[in-house]
Amino acid sequence: MKKFIILLIACISLMGCQSEPVNPDAQNIARVLQVDSKLLSHTKTLSEMVVKLKAVDLGGCPEEFKSAYKKYIAAWEAFATIEQEMFKADIERASKTIESFLSQYRADSGKATVKLSENWPTYSKEIIDSVSHIAGALNTVKTQALKYNVPYPAYKPLMFL
């Protein structure tokens, strides 16, 4: 038993020595993506999403990642301008349908987009174009992150008991 414990301690010590050096760029990108992946939770409007996105600390991230993330924010801002038109047209319907869209977006953006555009046929083209722009901008963010071997966090739906 004593030999087993000594061997176990030796193995653990060697594994600690073989760890890769920490890349601060990768750590900062991972931190941003972790925050970003949770922003849709408890978000009721597109404008609120923009505020949350702008509050994400991009400090320590490489410039090309920051640039991509800022374009991602701009895509949400453009969508928020459509939201304002929807609020002017019917604030009650807009509030309900946008909140529903945001709650479904991460799980199934396509389904959420179709449902929102069906509820707002007047803005259907703008909605689809905006969501497409957001998706493209997010893909650019993800591509920049992958240059540092940082994947976007997987979607984990909330489980209610």
Image (cartoon, rainbow, N blue to C red):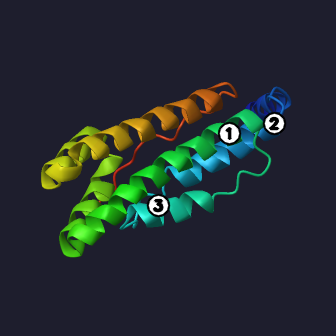
Q: Secondary structure at mark 3?
A: helix
Q: Which residue is mark 3?
A: 49
Element carrying mark 2: loop
Residue at (39% x, 67% y) in the render = 42
Tell us which disc is closer to us: 1 or 2: 1
Mark-to-mark CA distance, 1 and 2 = 23 Å
Q: How far across and down, in percent of the image, does residue 50 sit?
A: 51, 60
Q: Please, what is the three-letter code of the amino acid marked with disc 3? A: Met
Earlier-in-chain disc, 1 versus 2: 2
Rendered position, 5 above or below 89: above
Q: Is residue 97 above or below residue 106?
A: below
Between label 2 and label 3, give the one nearer the viewer. Answer: 3
Q: Position of residue 71 (x, y in %)?
A: 58, 42
Quick one: label 2 or label 3, which is nearer the N terminus? 2
Residue 108 as seen in the image, left or right of residue 59: left
Q: Which residue is mark 1?
A: 67
Classify the position of the N terminus by image quarter: top right
Q: Quadrant of the C terminus?
A: bottom left
Q: Position of residue 75 (x, y in %)?
A: 48, 45
Q: What is the total number of numbered labels drawn onto the structure image?
A: 3
User: Based on the displayed image, in which of its 4 quarters is residue 64 positioned?
Assistant: top right
Q: Which residue is mark 2?
A: 22
Report if the CB atoms under discs 2 and 3 are less than 8 Å apart. no
Q: Where is residue 40 drawn, in percent x and y?
A: 42, 57
Residue that appears at 48% across and 54% down: 77
| Amino acid identity at mark 2 | Val
